[in-house]
Image (tube, grey):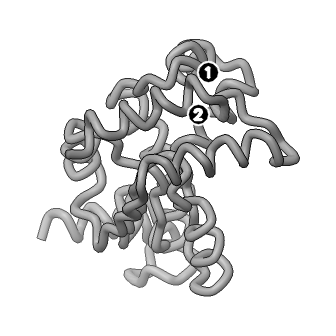
Amino acid sequence: DAVVQKLMTVADTDGDGIITEDEFMQHSEVFLGGRPARIILVVGGPGSGKGLLCERLVKECGVVHLSSGELLRAEVAKGTILGQQVKEIMDSGGLVSSAMMVTLMNNRMKDHPGKRILLDGFPRSEENAQDLVTLCGKPELALHLDCNDTILLERILKRGATAAQKRADDNFHTALQRIRTFHKYHH
């Protein structure tokens, strides 16, 4: 088979006809396409508890947690071109384009080939979901956290008032817009 031959040519670095564990790990992206074996989506409104649930699953199950919001905030903090582009969108409670989000998530997932990955807060739209399936395959599972809008708003405002590390989007105006945006794309 041509695919197997190509894999052997790339990964069998010592040419002995056997791909060792070290060779496999060194060339894991060739085998796994940079894609995690299993993706679990964790979706819900802003303040629904996605991050807390993911923290617990990381501790108890040893999975990798990727938060779309944290990835975007990190880009803003680093002052990258992407960070500069999304800062204004995030501050207004809007939705970052699907192309930017899928690229960012896919790049981070490549850091964890073969691992079970929790995608926290992603996909955020039908377009995100379609792009994710195209680039990374169908997710294994989706966990949807359903929460009343009043509770969401209360949690966001409490987090904004008590969190050690303040978030620019944890204020009344932006929280309302984030909840509206969530409902617009999650019907």
- Indicate the secondary structure of the residue bearing disc 2: helix
Mark seen at residue 83: 1
Q: Amino acid at mark 2?
A: Leu
- Indicate the secondary structure of the residue bearing disc 1: helix
Q: Residue at x 62, y 66 (%)?
A: 52
Q: How many marks?
A: 2
Q: Residue at x 56, y 13 (%)?
A: 88
Q: Residue at x 55, y 33 (%)?
A: 175
Residue 126 x/y as whole percent: 20, 41
Q: Earlier in the sequence, mark 2 or mark 1?
A: 2
Note whether 167 is above or below 109 in the view shown.
above
Mark seen at residue 72: 2
The answer to whether residue 39 is visible is no
Q: Residue at x 38, y 81 (%)?
A: 17
Quadrant placement of the C terminus: top left
Q: Are marks 2 and 1 in contact (CB under 8 Å)?
A: yes
Camera-side residue of 56 and 160: 160
Quadrant placement of the N terminus: bottom left
Using the rendered view, name the quadrant where residue 137 is placed.
bottom left
Query: Badge 2, how many Cα within 10 Å: few under 14, some, many 20+?
Result: many
Camera-side residue of 147 and 3: 147
Residue 101 x/y as whole percent: 42, 35
